[in-house]
Amino acid sequence: MEDVAVMNIDPVKALDDKVERLKKDLRSLGERVDNAQTDAAQQQLSTTNQIRDTTRKIAKTNDRLTELAESVHRLERLLVALNRKVRASETQKADFDTWPEIEKSLLARILAGQEAYARKTFTPQEAKDTRKAVAEYDRAALAAIDAAEALTTLPPNAEALWRKKYRQWRVIRSMERPEAPDENEHAGDSAAKSAGNEAVGRARELIRARIEDAVARDLLFPAWFENMLGPAAPPGKADDWLYTATDVVLYRLLHDVTSPANALGRAPQEQGHRRDLHDRLIVECAEYRKA
């Protein structure tokens, strides 16, 4: 009995038993970790597949929405064209292309005024400073001419003096004479601006009156007019719409635009009043067509 008791309390045996149990627990834990990782990987794969499927469905939906939007746009254009044909058969047409009451001389005054505004004008102080700069340039130019003439008469040993006078000549040749302010031109520009403003006001009155009459009588607008401004004034923006429509007609008259479809013709390449007006009308009319 004593031998059995001694074997049962053998510390080495007890330690080996604990080690075996720990190994079993460790293997069990490793298997659980492996299973958990496998489940996580499968779950991640499943989620990734679901995301891809959802993304494909969204892309297909977006493509379908784009197709529907294009179809609606085509339908709108067809309806507009159909409406024009129906109205054309039973409605009088507005004439915004012939303007005998707006004479060529009136348009010429408007263009002359625009050119005057485009030219640089001098303030009284700028004119004074420019005249001073012109006088200083003229004095330097005379001194340079004298220096150039002196180069041919200097003695051979006057090298320093020769270099000085030659430098004077080179300096004036690299400069540009300022443009002196022309009082007569300034006065002429002021008169052209005033006459141009009056001519613009008169032309706008005539054009706006005819457009308002066409609206009141429900006349059919020209194709280029509707393409640019839409079939009617947007709600709440009638006055702004009329102002822009007047400028569109005036632009065509000033720049001889005769296209039956394109209200403003080709966009001007050069910078200036015409380019600014063209760009403004494009932006404003786009807003009216959206409304």
Image: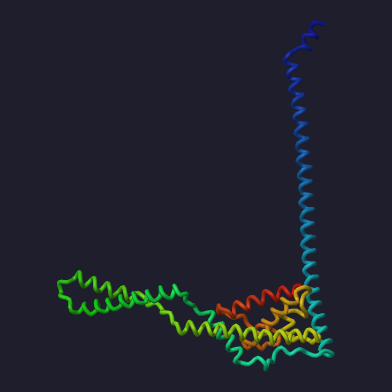
- As rendered, which of 238 and 182 lies closer to the eye? 182
Query: Residue 259 appears in which quarter of the rendering?
Result: bottom right
Q: Quadrant of the N terminus?
A: top right
- Callout count: 0
Horizontal arrangement in the rendering, residue 255 relative to residue 76 (left or right): left
Instruction: Please name the residue shown 20% across and 71% down the image.
Output: 161
Horizontal arrangement in the rendering, residue 280 relative to residue 58 (left or right): left
Question: In the rendered image of this protein, does residue 24 appear above or below residue 237?
Answer: above
Instruction: Please name the residue shown 18% across and 79% down the image.
Output: 153
- As rendered, which of 31 and 59 lies closer to the eye? 59
Horizontal arrangement in the rendering, residue 163 relative to residue 57 (left or right): left
Horizontal arrangement in the rendering, residue 268 relative to residue 148 (left or right): right
Instruction: Please name the residue shown 76% across and 78% down the image.
Output: 233
Q: Quadrant of the C terminus?
A: bottom right
Question: Residue 240, image x and y in percent?
Answer: 71, 76
User: For the view shown, which residue lies furthest in the top direction?
Assistant: 2
Instruction: Please name the residue shown 80% across and 5% down the image.
Output: 2
Question: In the rendered image of this protein, does residue 107 appear above or below residue 20?
Answer: below
Question: Residue 24, image x and y in percent?
Answer: 77, 27
Question: In the rendered image of this protein, does residue 123 appear above or below residue 30?
Answer: below
Question: In the rendered image of this protein, does residue 44 appear above or below residue 267?
Answer: above
Question: Residue 136, image x and y in percent?
Answer: 33, 74
User: For the view shown, which residue lies furthest in the bottom direction?
Assistant: 100
Query: Residue 266 appears in which quarter of the rendering?
Result: bottom right
Question: Residue 17, image x and y in percent?
Answer: 76, 20
